Amino acid sequence: MIVNLALSAALALTGVSTGTATKTVSFRGFSIQVPATWKVEKDPVGNLYVSTGSCPKNALQCAGFSIGGPGDIKTAYEGGPYRPNEPYHPGSDIGYCPPDKRYAIDQPPARPAKAGGAPFGTGHKARFAEWRLRCMTVTGKATSITYTQRIWYLAAEKVIVVDEWKTPGLAKILGKAVWR
């Protein structure tokens, strides 16, 4: 009974429904609780991609978000370091549109739609930016396809979280991160 009560309290604190089975995802000194159905993949340099389950037919990859460290920050904008006043775009070539890889990413707006601080566990605050981006054909014609890129950046901790799928509950999950 006490164990069940403690588990329910812990899950409630993470922002994940207590009726949902969860698992722990750990990275560079913090842990978050995500639904057990989400898949976590590690790349060769140790960064993570958390797939939330949906894999749209023409999407660049399954819906989800990435959690990166120093390497992702070092090459986060046109092959150079992350710039908080720019969307996350690590390649120096045309970026493909996450919801539909047949299209490219159009020029970003001059400013993010939202920007400021966001909680990232007790005692930590991320620099947050939300970009509303449009996709275009490879010949430069506008399309009706848009998506939102959300970025949580912790400079001192060398952590960047990039979500291009508006993952439901992600801000709350990150806000409840537990740091060692």
Image (spheres, helix red, strand yellow):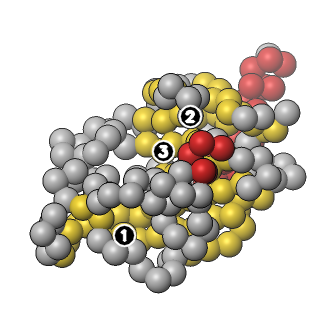
Q: Is residue 161 visible?
A: no
Q: Residue 10: where, in percent of width, then height?
A: 76, 33
**Rendered position, 176 above or below 118:** above
Q: Residue 70: where, in percent of width, then height?
A: 65, 44
User: Mark 3 or mark 1, which is nearer the start of the sequence?
Assistant: 3
Label 3: element kind: strand
Give the residue displayed 60% in from the left and 42% down from the top: 71
Amino acid beneath label 2: Asn
Label 1: element kind: strand
Q: Is residue 129 left or right of residue 30?
A: left
Q: Name the residue beneath numbered marker 1.
A: 133
Amino acid beneath label 1: Leu
**Rendered position, 37 above or below 67:** above
Mark 3 vs mark 2, CA separation in Å: 11 Å
Name the residue furthest bottom: 110
Of 56 and 35, which appears nearest the observer?
Answer: 56
Res. 8 image quadrant: top right
Q: Name the residue beneath numbered marker 3.
A: 65
How crowded pointer 3 is (Cα within 10 Å; few <14, some 14-19, many 20+) is rated as many
Q: Residue 178: where, in percent of width, then height?
A: 78, 38
How crowded pointer 1 is (Cα within 10 Å; few <14, some 14-19, many 20+) is rated as many
Q: Which is closer to the viewer, label 1 or label 2? A: 2
Q: Which is closer to the viewer, label 3 or label 2? A: 2
Of 111 and 73, which appears nearest the observer?
Answer: 73
Of 22 and 132, which appears nearest the observer?
Answer: 132
Q: Name the residue beneath numbered marker 2.
A: 47
Amino acid beneath label 3: Phe
User: Mark 2 or mark 1, which is nearer the start of the sequence?
Assistant: 2
User: Mark 2 or mark 3, which is nearer the start of the sequence?
Assistant: 2
Q: Is residue 90 visible?
A: yes
Cβ atoms under marks 1 and 3 closer than 8 Å: no
Mark 1 vs mark 3, CA separation in Å: 16 Å
